[in-house]
Image (cartoon, rainbow, N blue to C red):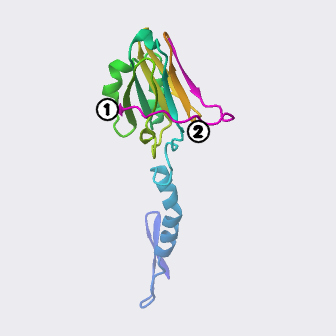
Amino acid sequence: MHPVSLSSFSLPILPRGQRPRLVAPALLHLSLLLLPLSLVGCGVLSPGAPKLKLGEVRVLAAPDANRNSAVVFELALVSDPALEQRLMNPAEKWFGAGADLAASYPQTLRVYHCEVTPGQELGLPSRLFEGQRAYAVFVFADLADGERRGRIEGWGEGGAISFARTGWSLTPRDKKTPAPQPPPPMRCDS
């Protein structure tokens, strides 16, 4: 075999009848090794946002909740880390911008509009969370004394969203206490 030089690249010249060694098997093996890395990079093997496990979420409104007015609140399930950071920004006014954000990010932001009247105890429908993946679940409440934002975290056993006369709270259920009977489900629209 005599090499022929083409600038800095050399090709072997094979005698007649001799077959060249195929590089294809080596390239095939290399491709098979790199394929999983490329799939992880594009998110095929990576699960993305974690699967939600919230348990039963109760909504409690005191008899004089929100100064005797219905409470409008929205749940936002966020499956994009950058959008999650944006919604944590205190300057964000949800009830003025929420619908536009949901329309702009239909694949990564799911919004459910809910309402409860004073004196009610209802449960959030489990269908809102079943099979969903999200980095964060935010609750935005439009109260008489202004908008409020809270975040549901670590609620594997469920919890409660409670509205009082002038405030509200988000409380995970204590794992040591037995789960109470579920209240009737409330209606939430997307």
- Hey, what amino acid is under mark 2? Gly
User: Under tag 1, what secondary structure?
Assistant: helix
Q: Can you tell which quarter of the image residue 108 is in?
A: top left
Q: In this view of the protein, which residue sits in the foreground, 33 or 143?
A: 143
Q: Earlier in the sequence, mark 2 or mark 1?
A: 1
What is the total number of numbered labels drawn onto the structure image? 2
Q: Residue at x 49, y 54 (%)?
A: 45
Q: Residue at x 52, y 21 (%)?
A: 162
- Hey, what amino acid is under mark 1? Ser
**Which residue has dot 2 on it?**
156
**Quadrant housing the C terminus:** top left
Q: Is residue 35 above or below residue 136?
A: below
**Numbered label attached to residue 104:** 1
Q: Residue 179: horizontal and vertical position, in percent?
A: 60, 36
The residue segment tinted magenta is 167-190
Q: Report the side of 140 relative to 170 (left or right).
A: left
